[in-house]
Amino acid sequence: MTLTPIPQPLTFPALTFAKLAPPSFLAAHLTNPKGSTRPSGRTPTQTRAPTCNTGSLSHANGSAVVRCGDTAVVCGVRGEILKTGDVAEYEAREVKGGDEEEEDDEGDEDDEGGKERRRKSRRDDTAEMARLNLLVPNIELATGCSPAHLPGGPPSVLAQTLTQRVLTLLHTSDMVGMAPLRIWFQPPRETTGATSGVMRMGGDMEEMDAREEEGEEMARAEVKAFWVLYVDVLFISLDGNAFDAAWLAILAALKDTILPRAWWDADREMVLCSDDPVEARRLEIRDLPVPLSFGVFEGDGLGKGSKEKEKEKEKGKEKWVLVDMDGFEEALCREEGTVVVGGGRRVVRIEKSGGAGAGMAEMRGLVDLAAKRRKEWMGVLGVH
Amino acid sequence: MTDRRRINGPLGGTAPPVFVSSLTSKTTSPAKRTRAPDELRKIFLKTGLTPSASGSAYFELEPSTPTAASECLASKAPALKLTCTVHGPRPLPRSAPFSPQLLLSTRIKFAPFAARQRRGYIPNVGERDLAAHLETALRGVLIGERWPKSGIDVVITVLEGEEDNSWNKGQSGESGRTGGWGMMSILSGCITVASAAIIDAGIDCIDLVTGGVAAVVRQPTAPPQVFLDPCPSDHEEIFAACVIGYLQTRDEITELWTKRSIMASTDDNRANTMEFEPLVDQAVEAAVAARLVLIEAIKESTEVKVQTSQFGHPKNAAS
């Protein structure tokens, strides 16, 4: 009779195990009896602490460097000038001129009608901003930030989707105010009466007469150009959760952006800027929506006996909602999504695809987490 | 041609802001150089910024006039900021022809916010030219025979570059598409940062290659003089400049690039600063100085590597 050899369990270092069987490796961590931890040592709902550094680029109007774990991003915002004459089919909108606007807003706040009017003008502003393409975000991954993203080719699908998501969120969240982006022409007072009629083209006669009467009291200002904000995001290093890092960098850079005072010079027929930092203005940032990306990892019952597998089939698959995934986890989760929460727990955007693992209860929890994360981010951005 | 895969902004095109000061005062003197002729700007060099790449490094030169930064919106003193990642050595695709040596490919890309004029994403001639120079500088150091049938990619992103003129002087001169004097110090920085990243990736080299720049510069009162590590906006006029890729222990030059006219050396030993050889010698001096920084950076990163290999990565300590 031969001795049956006692089977020796195979042993690997953790890293080899992670490479050979990534799903089982992650599942083994999450089913840890002492409480689920991820390979990075975080709990499933723990995010990586971000660090942020602003204003380090001298050629940009605003800039930020953000690092979340091993994902590092540089964002530069640069303002350029778009003349209304260069816009095809430009229609001048009725907007209040430059400096008086803020006072008017304050006054309107009391009554309901004013609020409604303000909301409508904000909507119109955002629509105008989108129509004129005043915000131009681009995300560049082809900087060698990870072996999967090497330069020398068109932007990858991931880069294109990220750019589109950022653009949509910039517009739908309505976070950048239109007022500082307008460049005005204030005609000198003496010529008011003569020019006001000429400037208002397309209005009917009655209205023009009304304007002229008004014009005698006040010089009619006109929007002659706009600031276009080129928001460029470059990834220095990518280890998962590209969207959150890119968005945080954009927020920080927009908050840091200073636009010089600009005006239309009628003699030179061009926009001039003042290089005095005292006159420069910051952007109007109305809200700072903060995203939280997550993924749902479904254990396939790997590394378990067949009996346990049977049991699992009855009660459904095990699943974990992982927040702020790193590159290793992202490769294993089919179901991914993002919750964006603004000030006062306003849900700005929810996107989710790839499965039905996260239900109502999970999503509610994620919104809570996103609100918590917003607080953390506000601390990093220096907003209280 | 529009790039449909990116967001291009308004169709009518946009113009960079024009500052009043650039129109009114045309003859403002450039910022004066405060360093001694043989004094380099402080270099910051750090490796290991991109953990997923085989090797990576970050290089920064401090702005030459740090105090002026906040005073005026139009002319901020730029610093030189470069990041470099190295991917590989990895096997060539099966379709590639056999190569007995390591294939090196270099890419240099300027960030859109790297220069005063916004740059597009499509690579231009100047970037390709710089990359070709960098390739020559690096090819001489790598021991390519040790990796047949494989390739490495060296990718450099210029986050912030130097420019010839400050705003006030307008956009005249040769700072056109191919770039002016600023390109010289960018190339020198690229050589040093790529060298650090290649060593971080653990690729065998015969020596450490570092870059150095020197330039013959007009001076208001004195005769022209050679300056190490010139910052183009500091000087009124640069007559000629030279970038070098230098291996100190072997006393070899892997890359040499001079620009503008300079006299070939004459036989008599008169000390003429307008000659080729003194200029190259000074560039070598600059490269030797940069090497000290490179060695320190490598030592630092090696210490960290040794520590993590002994005690495990802090990230994996919990598992």
Image (cartoon, rainbow, N blue to C red):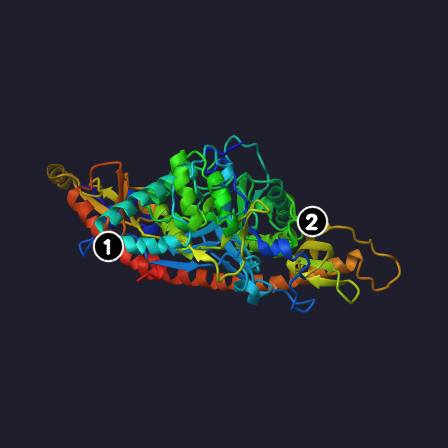
Q: Residues within 10 Å of mark 1 (few under 14, many from 20)?
A: few
Looking at this view, is B153 or B276 the one in front?
Answer: B276
Amino acid bearing label 1: Asp
Q: Is residue B283 left or right of residue B55?
A: right
**Chain holding disc 1:** A
**Chain holding disc 2:** B
Looking at this view, is A334 or B29 the one in front?
Answer: B29
Position in image of residue B181 (x %, y %): 67, 53
Q: Residue at x 69, y 49 (%)?
A: B173
Figure quadrant of residue B149: top right
| Residue at image mark 2 | B173
Looking at this view, is A30 or B11 the one in front?
Answer: B11
Looking at this view, is A16 or A158 the one in front?
Answer: A158
In the rendered image, the quadrant that contains the N terminus of chain A is: top left
In the rendered image, the quadrant that contains the C terminus of chain A is: bottom left
Mark 2 or mark 1, whichever is nearer to me: 1
Q: Residue at x 29, y 55 (%)?
A: A107
Position in image of residue A286 (x %, y %): 33, 52
* CA gap, disc 2 and disc 1: 58 Å
Please indicate, yes or no, whether residue B191 appears anywhere in the rendered image.
yes
Q: Residue at x 66, y 65 (%)?
A: B32
Amino acid bearing label 2: Gly
SS at mark 1? loop
Please indicate, yes or no, whether residue A41 appears anywhere in the rendered image.
no
The reply to whether the C-beta atoms of the residues labelled 2 and 1 are less than 8 Å apart is no
Q: Is residue A184 left or right of residue A330?
A: right
Question: How many labels sit on residues?
Answer: 2
SS at mark 2? loop
Q: Do badges 2 and 1 share one subunit?
A: no
Q: Which mark is drawn over residue A30?
A: none
Q: Which mark is drawn over residue A110?
A: 1
Position in image of residue A380 (x %, y %): 35, 60
